[in-house]
Structure formats: structure tokens, C-alpha cells
Image (cartoon, grey):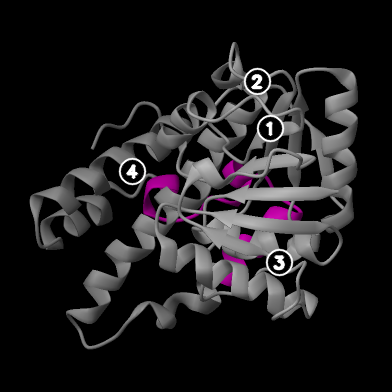
Amino acid sequence: MRISIIGAGNVAWHLAPALASVTDVRQVISRHEDSAGALAARVNAVCGLEGREKCCKATASLDCLYGDSDLYLIVSNDDSIATIASSTENFPGIWAHTSGSVGLEVFDGEKTAFGSFYPLQTFSKEIPVDVGKVPFFVEGSRPEVLETLKSVAGLVSSRVYTATSRRRRALHLAAVFACNFANQMWAEADILLRKEGLDITCLLPLLEATLGKLGSLSPAGAMTGPAQRGDMNVLRRHIEELPDEGMKELYRIVSQRILDASHPELII
């Protein structure tokens, strides 16, 4: 399987080496030449291909895209996928993107064989990720395309599922709530703690225990705290103690959401 990687951001930084260990990742393309070079070097280091003729090549131009790759994997930000699809030749390989929120219609009229290759995980370059444990959700324009993408995903992960564009969008939206929004809450907590000379590490045992509950309880069943108890005096005091209106409004909205589930008669 010969693969061309288009993009060199956080997702590609982890996905390309994982694929390179079991396939031929032959080129990395990014409009940022330094990023493309760094990722190609990472791929070559993983495969021991530094300086060899068949090493992974880096380029900053889509005009240099190989025409005989088996898979063209677009690992870019969502807004760039349509532009990449429309500005590249319809080479005979499979075209796929790694987005959770972009449907297959982005390839309609542009490519003949296409699909999605969505790894449901948060990626940062400096944090190692065990790609083998990352769930992949794949979709194909034809049954044989789907089977190929499932096979490729199965080379790097033990958790491969089929998902329509609609289901992928639902997964991505849920992930935003569970990951990005939760992380913003941790950022708010860190702000409050730093005012007292502390930081978010004080809450790590609490966060680990909270996440651990999800193995046996639903999120609603694991809910605790003043809003779940309907303790209005504590809720109002918390709002008074918050340092700015943004935090106060955030606290009100989330607390009311919890109240609506536990004590619908109460309004903060």
C-alpha cells in the first residue's frame, strides 16, 4: 500500500509514522515546507529509511503529488479539504480525509474512489499516542473502497468501525463536548486555582476518579455536586465569588442544565 499524506499537523504527526510502520508512506505534502520536512524525517526515522532511495519525500506543492499512490490521505484542517479535493488531479487511488465533521460529499464530482478515515482521538505533537488503541471510523464511496480503508485502519488499530457521514458528525460533536468543552472547564478551574497559588494538578485525583466512574455508571448517574443536590445557597455563593461575568454566566448555564435534570423546579 503506497500512501501520500497531505498535511503535516498534529494528526499527521502521529498517524503517518503508525502507517509507515506497516505500509509505504512515500510522501508528505504541506504548504509549510518545514513541517513537511519534519514529518517526512520522522517517518524515515521510524522505518530506518534515512538517506535511502525509497525514503519518504517532503514537498510543499500539491503539483508534486505522485500519480500512482494507492491512498491519498488528506490530514488537514476541515476547511482545506474541499480545496485540496478540487485542486488535485483525479488519480486512480483512493482519496480519504481524516475529519469527523466533513461528509463524503466533499469529494463528489472531484474523485472517483473516496472515503473517510477518522481517528477519534485528541492529538498533540508533544504527547505520545498509542495509535493501536485509537478507534477509527471509516466510510467508503463503494463497498470495495470501504473494505480497503477498513483493512488499512486494521493494520494500525484494533478498533475499526464503519460509520456514515451522519454518524461521524455525531461522534465529532459528542467529542467536542466530552473533550474540548471539558478541557475548557479545566482551564477555568486552573485560572481560579492559580489565583491562590495552586494549579490544576491539585484536581488530578478528582478528575481520574470522575472518569473512572464511567466504567460502571452513566455520566448522569455519576453526577454529584451542589447543582445535583439542589443546594441553591452554595450555587449562588459560588456565582458571587467568581471573578468575572464570563465565568459567572458559564457557571449559571451549566448549573441550570444540571438542575433541569435533577431538580427541574429550581431556577438559579
Q: Which amino acid does label 4 sit on?
A: Ser
Image marks 2 and 3: residues in contact by CB distance under 8 Å:
no
Q: Name the residue under label 3.
A: 17
Q: Earlier in the sequence, mark 3 or mark 1?
A: 3
Q: Nearer the viewer, residue 97 or 202?
A: 97
The residue wearing badge 1 is: 95
* Distance of label 4 from label 2 (alpha carbons): 48 Å
Report the residue that reaches farthest toward the front: 53
Tell me the kind of residue under disc 2: Lys
Real-space Cα separation, disc 4 to disc 1, in angstroms: 44 Å
Q: Is residue 140 magenta?
A: no
Say which element carries label 1: strand
Between discs 4 and 1, the one toward the N terminus: 1
The answer to the question of whether label 2 and label 1 lie on touching residues, with beta carbons closer than 8 A, is: yes
Query: Magenta span covers which residues?
Result: 208-229
Q: Is residue 122 visible?
A: no
Q: Which of marks 2 and 3 is nearer the N terminus?
A: 3
Q: Relative to 101, is 38 above or below?
A: below
Res 145 → quadrant: top right
How crowded pointer 1 is (Cα within 10 Å; few <14, some 14-19, many 20+) is rated as: many
Q: Residue at x 80, y 49 (%)?
A: 2
What distance separates the C-alpha of mark 3 from that of mark 1? 19 Å
Q: Judge depth for marks 2 and 3 and give the one in front.
A: 2
Q: Which amino acid does label 3 sit on?
A: Pro
| Residue with the mark numbered 4 | 255
Mark 3 or 4: the one toward you: 3
Task: From the viewer's perspective, tell me whether residue 236 is left or right of residue 18.
Answer: left
